[in-house]
Image (tube, helix red, strand yellow):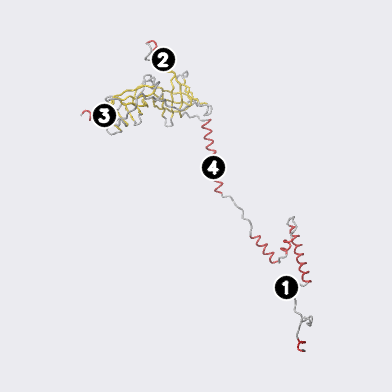
Amino acid sequence: MDENKDLKTPENLTETEKPAEDTQEITQPEAEEAQTAVEAEAADAVADSEQDGENNAPTEQDGETAALTEQDGETAADEAEAVQPVSKKKPILQTTIIISIVIVAIAVLTTLAVRLFFNNDITGTWHLVRQVQVMDDAATSDEAVKTLDVDYYFDFKNDGSVSSTIGTVSSTGTYSTSKDENGNSVVSINNYDVLTQYFLEGDYTVELSGNVFTGKKMTFTSVSSPELSYEFESSSYKAPKIEREEEFTLNDDLVGKWSYSTGEFNLVYQFNKDGTAKYIEQAMSINPYTYSYVNIDISMSGIYTVNDGSVTISYYLLEQSNKDITFRLDGDTLYINDYPFTKDGAATVDQAQTAAAQ
């Protein structure tokens, strides 16, 4: 039993022989010293925060963060300086495109404004109501001439051509513009009047007024006879409707464009499958008033009806009228009123006449 006296039990161990407490446990003085260090670091953080203009007091987490070592603080500061927000610059190309769009828009608006309000160009379609004296076949000899208000539609094109249309009959001529010594606009026109059979030609001063909203107007005043003037209004042409008197029957032999030409004049008949037709006459003539040679270029649009050996072309002048022609087909030659016509240049007139003589 005496052997048990040598055993070291917790009860009989001396203070120096007792095992040390867990190494993780901090002694009271060390805890107080650490707490003091934390509080000092927190105080320094608060002072720095106040110096930077921050109004919020550090939270408990801020205090714990303030306990970082000096080395960690310097590393974090270096990283903060390295990571700076990159300023985004708008591409120069985008700005250039926007400027270009604005310039184009201004140019378009300026052009539109000029056309709408300040357009002094005579090109376009103009309506003229003109008093014309015509022969009245139904009247007595004393009343053979009567005066009518006739609707003309003049179309001035950029290529220097001008056409005047009454109903579905048109006459094409030429015009040019210039300035007189006073700076006034002057138009020189040469156009054959299909109704009165004389030429509308000469020099006229031009005055334009109005716009597309109030209505554009144009005045022609004769240079040689200032008392003679014409008042036009900007308008659009609408062809009058031509009524068919008989049911249309297609004749395939007639369909196409047929031409007859000599050195003095050209004639063209065009017959379409839908029953429409066109007649063109081009010739040289003498103006009975000026005795000068002038070109005549007349076209007549309408519908056609085929009969036994004849064709009736219906058109509109002052009223719906008819033009009757005879025809016969001989090989590639179509004889219209005994004149040999060739189809789409299939043969020349000389060749057709030679073939007919044989």
Looking at the image, tell me whether mark 4 or mark 3 is earlier in sequence order: 4
Question: In this view, which residue lies farthest toward the left?
Answer: 358
Question: In this view, which residue lies farthest toward the bottom?
Answer: 2
Q: Please tell me whether residue 182 is drawn above or below residue 16 in the rendered image.
A: above
**Camera-side mark, 3 or 2:** 3
Quarter assignment of residue 55: bottom right
Q: Please tell me whether residue 271 is drawn above or below residue 134 in the rendered image.
A: below
Q: Which residue is mark 3?
A: 329
**Camera-side mark, 4 or 1:** 1
Looking at the image, tell me whether mark 1 or mark 2 is earlier in sequence order: 1
Q: Which residue is mark 4?
A: 101
Quarter assignment of residue 147: top left
Looking at the picture, tell me which residue is in the foreground, 251 or 136.
Answer: 251
Q: Residues within 10 Å of mark 3 (few under 14, many from 20)?
A: some
Q: Is residue 280 visible?
A: no
Under tag 3, what secondary structure? strand
